[in-house]
Image (spheres, grey):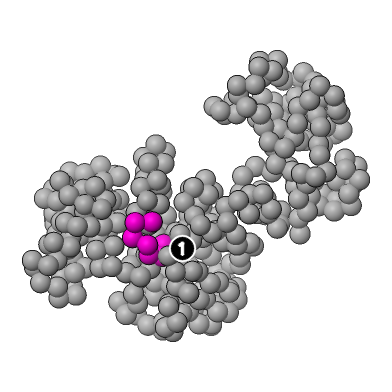
């Protein structure tokens, strides 16, 4: 087990940032902590790193109790969103810095730094200064600096947040490939659900200092346990017990994903309130028996051109696709 967090609570004055948290993360896992701002995920990451100490509870890294240990006494390294590169040092000198602090000799640390830069495809940029690099390249330098000291656990605090969409998507693929190559545990903090789904082996959904649910991307999307998870991971039609009773004859809160709403030749009549083009799909906002329902269909569907606001369509909703929510 790479990380074991046991009954950890963190308070800032009267504010409870993390509330009696229990969490275990496997060795070699790409584990993401996903949630809105203020949900507690970054505080947990900072406690794992040693930048914050728990108010109560214990933290173990590979069975070693590190609850009160300083950051430099933990076998972890952290990559931040702002990169924190030294502007007056070259790229390779930035990467060498952690090794120099550890007393590694010049020849050895230079070789290790170049090897780390090679892993992130920046060996040819070793002598440049950070200001001569793009945002994506600076992010890779920060990664190289973090992995060169060979930590058992790498912590990443929204490291792609400052990048534009296309570059962020490219870096997501590279980050996952790097984690597989290194085989070390990655703990990734993000508020971006698509990013978490793309990268993660497992994800913890945070809300108000607690974990709502832990699971694989598929489990969280297909079988969310709570309304919060259903709405935060993807788009969801959530029906309260009264609405579910009316539409399905089920007296409990349930969820249905938009792609499971079938536009058919027969079924219940629904009015199109809005049509939203999303590239590969088209989202329809429907009014069904006085209730708003979201449907999503392929943009290549020949019927799409007929789906205009104020038109009506026939809709089929299957009970077998419903997911009960707590």
In the image: residue 15, left or right of residue 66 = right
Q: Residue 150 occupies which quadrant of the picture?
A: bottom left
- Determine which quarter of the picture holds residue 184: bottom left
Q: Could you say which quadrant of the image residue 77 lies in?
A: bottom left
Q: Is residue 211 above or below residue 267?
A: below
Seen in the picture, residue 175 relative to 18 is either above or below; the reply is above
Label 1 environment density (alpha carbons within 10 Å; few <14, some 14–19, many ≥20): many
Instruction: Name the spot of residue 188 as percent of width and height, x first.
Output: 44, 59
**Residue at 19% of width from left, 69% of height from top?**
99
Q: Nearer the viewer, residue 249 or 294?
A: 249
Q: Nearer the viewer, residue 224 or 12?
A: 224
Please indicate, yes or no, whether residue 139 appears anywhere in the rendered image. Answer: yes
Provide the residue designation for mark 1: 29
Residue at 76%, 27% in the rendered image = 263
Q: Residue at image x 17%, y 49%?
A: 123
Residue 85 seen anywhere in this rendered image of the structure: no
Residue 268 in the image: state x and y as whole percent.
86, 29
Left or right of residue 136: residue 212: right
Quadrant of the image containing the C terminus? bottom right
Residue 121 lies within the magenta run: no
Q: Which residues are magenta?
A: 180-186
**Residue 136 position in % (x across, y down):** 30, 44
Drawn side of residue 159 relative to residue 251, left or right = left
Find numbered disc 1 in the image and state the secondary structure of the residue it sits on.
loop
Nearest the viewer among 261 and 166 is 261
């Amino acid at each position: 087990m790479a990380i074991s967090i046991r009954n950890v609570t963190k308070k800032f004055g009267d504010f409870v940032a993390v509330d009696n948290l229990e969490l275990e993360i496997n060795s070699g896992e790409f584990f993401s902590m996903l949630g809105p701002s203020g949900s507690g995920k970054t505080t947990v990451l900072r406690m794992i790193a040693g930048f914050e100490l728990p108010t109560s509870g214990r933290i173990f890294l590979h069975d070693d109790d590190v609850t009160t240990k300083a950051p430099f006494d933990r076998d972890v390294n952290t990559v931040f969103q702002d990169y924190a590169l030294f502007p007056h040092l070259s790229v390779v000198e930035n990467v060498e810095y952690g090794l120099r602090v550890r007393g590694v000799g010049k020849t050895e640390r230079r070789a290790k730094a170049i090897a780390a830069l090679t892993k992130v495809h920046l060996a040819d940029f070793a002598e440049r200064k950070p200001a001569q690099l793009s945002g994506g390249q600076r992010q890779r330098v920060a990664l190289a600096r973090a992995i060169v000291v060979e930590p058992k656990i790498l912590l990443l605090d929204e490291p792609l947040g400052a990048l534009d969409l296309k570059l962020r998507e490219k870096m997501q693929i590279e980050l996952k490939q790097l984690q597989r190559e290194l085989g070390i545990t990655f703990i990734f903090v993000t508020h971006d659900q698509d990013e978490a789904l793309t990268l993660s082996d497992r994800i913890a959904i945070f809300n108000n200092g607690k974990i709502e649910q832990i699971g694989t991307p598929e489990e969280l999307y297909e079988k969310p346990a709570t309304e919060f998870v259903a709405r935060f991971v993807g788009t969801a039609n959530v029906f309260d017990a009264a609405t579910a009773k009316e539409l399905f004859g089920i007296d409990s809160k349930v969820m249905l994903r938009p792609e499971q709403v079938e536009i058919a030749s027969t079924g219940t009549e629904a009015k199109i309130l809005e049509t939203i083009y999303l590239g590969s799909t088209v989202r329809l906002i429907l009014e069904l028996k006085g209730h708003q329902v979201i449907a999503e269909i392929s943009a290549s569907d020949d019927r799409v051109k007929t789906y205009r606001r104020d038109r009506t369509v026939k809709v089929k909703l299957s009970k077998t696709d419903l997911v009960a929510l707590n």
